[in-house]
Image: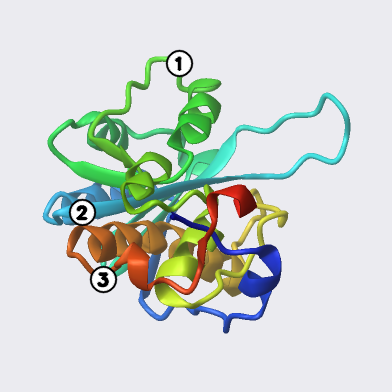
Amino acid sequence: MKISISKQQLSELPMEHYTGRIEVIDTLSGAESAVNQLRGTELIGFDTETRPTFKKGQTHDVALLQLASTECSYLFRLNIIGMPECLKELLEDPNQIKIGLSTHDDFRNLKKKYEDLKPEGFIELQNYVTRWNIIDKSLSKIYGILFGKRLSKSQRLSNWEAEQLAEAQQHYASLDALACIRIYVHLSNGGFKPEDSKYSIDFEEEEI
């Protein structure tokens, strides 16, 4: 038995909304304060955003790095403040658990500019969810399977280097990071039983 949700099934789910606190970090002092607060949390959700490219051969550096606790999402504007040493140390701390999805892509993009970054202490959800026979790889599909809610992707191709991040951008970025924590906690606490899922499929009918 495998677990997978189709695009059609996902589109029919109600939208999830972010309701927590958000702090946009665009100063070095703000970064130090945010990292100090995150140091006191057990689990940290992780994600990044990069300004989209619409011309062949054009690339952009990672503009936003999101780190979320269950209470607050911290949006580090790397295009403004770069990679503060305190943030780098947090990402490299093997004892501070960070949870993300497709982290290898995030790390590769970050290392294009921050070559000496060596992330440690990360749990990769694409690998973790396979213990529960979930074969989908996207955050939206995994979240839909577990919680019956849909994560909006409407801001994915917005300008993450804008002078001011719009409220919709902040909520989108924050929810993606928080969703990583929710998925990990729900699974690790026994909240999901594959045999009871309505998204179970026959092996021959797998949808990737």
Earlier sequence position, callout 2 versus callout 1: 2
Give the number of the mark in front: 2 or 3.
2
- Give the Cα separation between the discs numbered 1 and 3: 31 Å
For the point 53% across and 22% down, the residue is 113
Q: Is residue 184 left or right of residue 4?
A: left
Q: Is residue 133 left or right of residue 54?
A: left
Identify the image quadrant of residue 20: bottom left
Nearer to me, 145 or 29: 145
Nearer to me, 8 or 23: 8
The picture places residue 8, in percent across and down from the top left corner, at 70, 71
What number is the disc on residue 115? 1
- Give the Cα separation between the discs numbered 2 and 1: 26 Å
Any part of residue 154 in sight: no
Q: Amino acid at mark 1?
A: Glu
What number is the disc on residue 43? 2
User: Which element is circle 2 on?
Assistant: strand
Q: Residues within 10 Å of mark 2 (few under 14, many from 20)?
A: many
Identify the image quadrant of residue 127: top left
Number of numbered markers: 3
Q: Which residue is mark 3?
A: 71
For the point 36% across and 50% down, the residue is 129
